[in-house]
Amino acid sequence: MSPSHVGPPSLSRRGLLKRGVFGGALLALGGGGALFLREGLSLPLPEGLQVFGPREYATFQAIARRAFPPREGWPDADTARVALLADQVLARGDPLVAQEVRTVLGIFDNALAGLLFSGRVTPFSRLSPEAQDAALEDWRTSRLVFRRGAFHALRSLAHAAYYSHPAAIAATGYVAPQGFHVADAPVWRGPADGSFAGTGGSTP
Amino acid sequence: MSGRIRTGDELTEDQTLTCDVCVVGSGAGGGVLGLELAKRGLDVVMLEEGGYHTRRDFDLNEAKAYSTFYQEAGNRATDDLSIGIFQGRTVGGGTAINWCACFRTPPEILERWRDTHGVKGLDATTLAPHWDWLEERLNIREWPLEQSNRNNRILWEGLGALGYSRGTVKRNVRSCAALGTCGLGCPTNAKQSLLVTLIPEAVEQGMRLFANVSARKLETQGGRVVAVHADVLNPGTNQPTGKRLTVKAKVTAVCGGAINSPGLLLRSGLTGRGRVGKRLFLHPVVVSNARFQEPVEAYRGAPISVYSRQFINRGEGRLGWLLEVPPLLPILNSLALTGLGPAHQDQMARLPYANALISICLDGVHPGDEGGTVALRGEREYSRFKVDYPLNDFHWEAFREALKVSARIQFAAGAEQVSSPHSRPVVMRSEKDLSLLDDAPYGPLQLSVLSAHQMGGCAMGGSPETSVVDSTLRYWDTDNLFVVDGSVFPTALGVNPMESILGIAHWGSQHVAAAV
């Protein structure tokens, strides 16, 4: 069989993000405004947030609580401060990516979007844990590539943030090699610094 | 000429430089080219968008490494997010953060480039002396099986039990402590990346390297590149500082790798008659995750030391694959595993007992397989390109069969459980469960697909109607512009691409030098 590269029509990530925003605005004007504006969860904000606003922070942390529920020997989502770590990851990257994640979180939590996609009228962050799991599953299995992509992106960001926390790393049993990193190793920039001497391994 | 490595924080004024050759990119292509040109006494200026990170920065912090040394802070992906793309962005490029697997280009691939794509004068015999030199200089040697970690030995044993072909991998290391963290940058300089070998040598020969400098546009006049216009980036934020660097060179070599090289050409209005950005190949990868009763500790030891090409050729119209194993560091493993919540945590809690096999698919060698595309995104986009790679039944069939083969190998080696990379993993407890893979969904983002090897986008070939560069790596329509990196590959390779890029850059340097 030869590849045809003819697959089912799918909308691009950017196109759908635009549709999400504009579609939501149009629906709000058409009478769904109360749902569009329905408040999500409110959480105390940690210091140092650079990307997330209060709503995105609370939504992401709500997702993280379902991803990392309390478990003996492991930090839970609040202890690991997953949303704050995710915020820091996003702050180091392209500002447009950060903006897209904010938009996705807005759609994810939005009650009107919830109604359109799956019939729920409560913001994700205010749902019961069981209903949140069902909502996550709905995004994961959606027939829309955009929604599956959004689930994938948020899930990946949550995992990358959580497993950067020392307590979470320790809980996996992984111990990074010790004694090999030299924090004050000289940085060679050219012959004015002498001959380059950095080739070949060294074992402490 | 006094060679030196400068970084964005030092570039506080707009500057215009003149030189013989401007090399854009410091990875496997640019790094080799820079040295070869400098050795010929040419005045070389090299621009690298990423930072100058050395062993001082390689502190084995996984989160920091991905966000600092990789393209788009580790978030590069196809436009629909269906394929995650790992690609280096630092001085030394991918050679600084890859897993050290070295293969010469398979002869049948070079023959295909000649017979199907019209590439002239590039065969295994021609390249052999270049690879010989590189293997000596970078200490590329067989990694003995007895030094392989348990993760690789599982692959070796499983392949042997099933009678499949298997081999050991050559690695570019010297006095390697086998920490398992090659993907985070080598803290001991054991990895013979270009960061610690050819690039310093080129600088000693007089090459000027500017890190945190993003080439934005090639200015052309009368069929020649007359200037490279670049932005200086803040090393801390990666954002433009507002300062500019302009390089006026006799010859320009674009070496930004597949995706960034075609992206720079497109941004410069150089479309190669519509061929630039086409035939992008990603070696799409599916990961089969296994759990063993005894500790595997797949995060320690040389990451890749065993491989199999048993399934690389499955006949025309059927995508084949290379089998290897990845290192399973916590973040990487959390991303390779699918699922969410307690089930995912259960698997992470068994990390020391985890093994994974990766099936690296050989794309671009079957009729009609044109791979993906690179295109520009909106005006506001700075570092991202629109990367599309349509996945269809051709791929899903191969991924499904590859997962079956992987699970069979893992069970043959003693796995107690194997799980697929579906968004809801298919969990198998013995070989009789393999049929569960037939019932699972196959579609974008229903199955996790990754890429660590990017090729094509500026394909080499025998005609300007079908390719972007000729058989000397020269851009067809511009006399003094060359492309020297993996983007010139007309197809993927079916092996890890670093040594192929190194070899072709070493061979191609004669053509670039001759154009000065």
Image (tube, grey):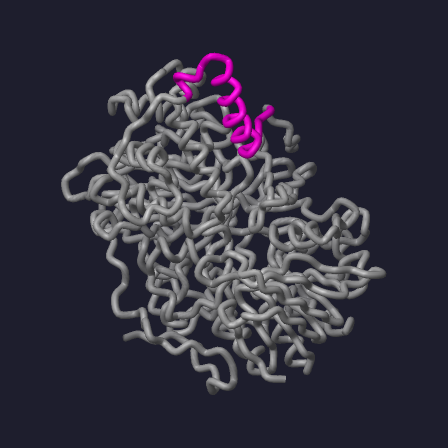
Percent across and percent down for residue B347 are 27, 39
Residue furthest right in the image: B222
Q: Is residue B108 visible?
A: no
Residue at image x 47%, y 48%?
A: B323
Decide which of B79, B334 is in the foreground and name it: B79
Residue at image x 45%, y 78%?
A: A188
Q: Is residue B466 visible?
A: yes
Q: Quadrant of the N terminus of chain B?
A: bottom right
Q: Which residues are magenta?
A: A9-36
Main SS, magenta residues: helix
Decide which of B293, B191 is in the foreground and name it: B191
Percent across and percent down for residue A62 are 29, 32
Q: Quadrant of residue B25?
A: bottom right
Residue at image x 42%, y 57%?
A: B304
Decide which of A22, B290 is in the foreground and name it: A22
Judged left or right of residue B269, residue B487 is left
Q: Quadrant of residue B199?
A: bottom right
| Residue B98 inside the magenta-drawn segment | no
Percent across and percent down for residue B110 are 68, 56
| Residue A15 inside the magenta-drawn segment | yes
Q: Quadrant of the C terminus of chain B?
A: bottom right
Q: Is residue B115 above or below residue B427?
A: below
Q: Is residue B235 above or below residue A46?
A: below
Judged left or right of residue A130, residue A119 is right
